[in-house]
Amino acid sequence: MKIFLLILAVALILLVPTLLYSQFTLKNVEKRIAKEHPVGEITVDELNGRLSTADSSNYCIFDVREVNEYHVSHLPGAIQVDPSISVDTFMENFAADVKGKHLVFYCSVGKRSAILTERLDEAAKQAGAVSSVNLRGSIFRWYNSGYPVYRDSSEVSEVHPYDSKWGRLLEKRSLSDSTSAKQP
């Protein structure tokens, strides 16, 4: 009986990390963020489609990552804002830019941007924004879906991983993997 319990304990020690690791997927992270922060969302495919139309000027995209993350790569036309920016400071800096626009916030996986969307939503609408939404899965989902990311005005094939744990959610690719059909 003792040997059976020892084998069972060793099996559990080996199995539990495997089960936990298998649950750490971008899809599961997206679901958890949506549950914890119930804000409007837009998918990467929807955003790409809208940026590919003549109405793309109706969208204002905010990158809610640290400056060093933004400088590695970002979505086309994104404006970097500090994740901890206050509502007042955001409105002082961007009130004129948001009027009549759909605001899209993103970060690495969507948590920081969901939090900022929650904080800014009411003030943005009062300033005349049409909507404010979080990009589901954020730049990791955008990149993993094959859409282009940029450093300055050049397309690049990398995204800041945030750290080694979160970086596991990024798929490796080269510039040749993003197709012109997917470019906004």
Image (cartoon, helix red, strand yellow):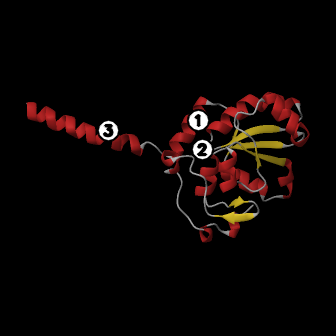
- Reading the image, the residue beneath label 1 is 33
Counting from the top left corner in percent of width and height, residue 120 is at 77, 31
Residue drawn at 54 percent across, 35 percent down: 32
- The local crowd at label 3, few if under 14, some if 14 to 19, many if 20 or more residues have their Cα within 10 Å, is few
Q: Secondary structure at mark 2?
A: loop
Q: Secondary structure at mark 1?
A: helix
Dot 2 or dot 1: first in sequence order is: 1
Residue drawn at 57 percent across, 46 percent down: 162
Up/down of 147 relative to 39, above or below: below
- The local crowd at label 2, few if under 14, some if 14 to 19, many if 20 or more residues have their Cα within 10 Å, is many
- The residue under label 1 is which amino acid type? Ile
- Reading the image, the residue beneath label 2 is 109
- Reading the image, the residue beneath label 3 is 16
Dot 3 or dot 1: first in sequence order is: 3
- Residue 183, quarter of the rendered image: bottom right
Up/down of 166 relative to 126, above or below: below
Q: Residue furthest bottom?
A: 176
Q: Nearer the viewer, residue 53 or 14?
A: 14
- Residue 122, quarter of the rendered image: top right
Up/down of 84 relative to 141, above or below: above
For discs 2 and 1, the disc positioned in front in the rendered view: 2
Q: CA gap, disc 3 to disc 2?
A: 25 Å
Dot 3 or dot 2: first in sequence order is: 3
Q: Residue furthest front?
A: 68
The N terminus sits in image quarter: top left
Q: Is residue 73 visible?
A: no
Counting from the top left corner in percent of width and height, residue 25 is at 48, 46
Counting from the top left corner in percent of width and height, residue 76 is at 75, 57
The C terminus sits in image quarter: bottom right
- The residue under label 2 is which amino acid type? Val
- The residue under label 3 is which amino acid type? Val
| C-beta proximity under 8 Å, tags 2 and 1 | yes
